[in-house]
Amino acid sequence: MMKVEVVENGVQATEKINTLEASGFGKENIYIFAHDENRSEHLTDATETGGMGIKEQGFFDSIGNVFKSRGDELRNKFESLGLSKQEAEQYEMELDKGRLVLVATDEK
């Protein structure tokens, strides 16, 4: 099971996280994405949600992301969570607009 939400800011993200938690997703399986890496890390820390590490991406994808553009890295992370290539591109465009994307999964 997977759920993807697009929100405008951290306040909305927190509200959606609470809703996702109430519907059965664990915080460790909810991932917040922002185009700015620092914003993404800050929100992940502040909301105590899951971080995208080697466990979620796999060793080679994790290392490969070091050499990719931020857009390529984000699309790769979306795909590693189970989104299709087309969905990953769609949500990366939302990030380009300054929005946040939440991905909740019970498979990782």
Image: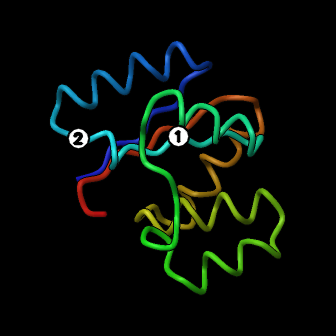
Provide the residue designation for mark 2.
25
Specify the quadrant of the image occupied by residue 88.
bottom right
* Left/right of residue 62 with respect to residue 69 in the rendered view: left
- Amino acid found under the numbered disc labelled 1: Ile
Q: Residue 10's x, y, as percent?
A: 57, 19
Secondary structure of the residue carrying numbered label 1? strand
Residue depicted at x 71% and y 44%:
93
- Amino acid found under the numbered disc labelled 2: Phe
Q: Residue 28 versus residue 104: which sits nearer the camera?
A: 28
Specify the quadrant of the image occupied by residue 39.
top right
**Label 1: few (<14), some (14–19) or many (≥20) C-alpha neighbours in 10 Å:** many
Residue depicted at x 31% and y 52%:
105
Q: CA distance from mark 2 to mark 1?
A: 14 Å
- Going from the N terminus, do you reach mark 2 or mark 1 first? 2
Q: How many marks?
A: 2
Q: Residue 61 versus residue 97: which sits nearer the camera?
A: 61
Q: Is residue 28 above or below residue 98?
A: below
Quadrant including the C terminus:
bottom left
Residue depicted at x 46% and y 28%:
47
Q: Which mark is residue 32?
A: 1
* Left/right of residue 7 with respect to residue 2 in the rendered view: right
Q: Residue 108 versus residue 51: which sits nearer the camera?
A: 51
